[in-house]
Image (spheres, rainbow, N blue to C red):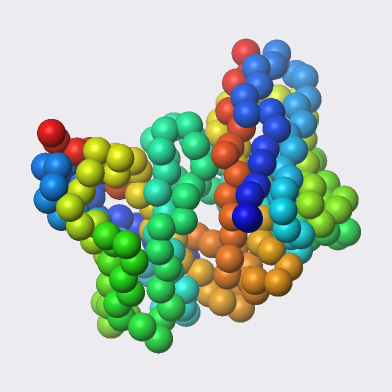
Amino acid sequence: GESVGLHLPTLSVQEGDNSIINCAYSNSASDYFIWYKQESGKGPQFIIDIRSNMDKRQGQRVTVLLNKTVKHLSLQIAATQPGDSAVYFCASKVSSASKIIFGSGTRLSIRP
Amino acid sequence: GAVVSQHPSWVICKSGTSVKIECRSLDFQATTMFWYRQFPKQSLMLMATSNEGSKATYEQGVEKDKFLINHASLTLSTLTVTSAHPEDSSFYICSASPLESGRDTQYFGPGTRLTVL
């Protein structure tokens, strides 16, 4: 069946370092991918997305990389700040369908 | 723009009672709204997809008679948890897909924490 999974449940990084959060997906028909940030007790917040016709997309301090060959995507956060502490979810979607499938989440914690 | 609200933000109820949660798109019209459930330290699990004016489509394993969804307008969807039990305690999150943005965009609400005693 369709699933999106993450390699690591928790990630601890030093403030100022770069963070890399990985995600694997199983549905080869997925052609749209999204990263969300969820702070405690809040709804998911959109960070960045990428379509399958691209392999890299950059935003402000964030970069998403997509490797369709191995069905893997990653989220890179540059110069990680205390405010980046949250759970990060990758999600995938087939454009012809309406629903988004969420991965299991990675908790990012920042060491001062 | 693109704000989705939920009401209430939290609710505590007794076992056996019903609870209604509202999801509103405040500054856009939504063709489709989605309801998710999230247990502690877990991911979001899609419960159902609702389109304005039609019956909701429930995911496998979600009881449609227990989780009643109404999407009466392009800005409001409601989820009613009927005869709630402690195992229904969870964080319920809705999202809305704007009319004009295509099917890929979803904006999420802040969630509703349901605790059933």
**Residue A94 as seen in the image, left or right of residue A111:** right
Q: Position of residue B28 (x, y in %)?
A: 73, 58
Residue at 55% across, 33% down:
B91
Q: Position of residue A11 (x, y in %)?
A: 20, 44
Vertical side of A23 occupied by A28: above or below: below
Q: Position of residue B46 (x, y in %)?
A: 58, 51
Quadrant location, the C terminus of chain A: top left
Vertical side of B72 occupied by B38: above or below: above
Residue at 65% across, 74% down:
B102
Residue at 11% across, 42% down:
A14
Say whether residue B58 is visible. no
Query: On the image, which quarter does residue B41 sit in?
Result: top left
Residue placed furthest toward the bottom: A53
Q: Nearer the viewer, residue A81 or B114?
A: A81
Vertical side of B68 occupied by A35: above or below: below
Say whether residue A33 is visible. yes
Q: Position of residue A58 (x, y in %)?
A: 31, 71
Residue at 74% across, 38% down:
B22
Vertical side of B61 occupied by B117: above or below: above
Q: Nearer the viewer, residue B64 or B33?
A: B33
Q: Nearer the viewer, residue A10 or B102?
A: B102
**Residue B60 as seen in the image, left or right of residue A34:** right
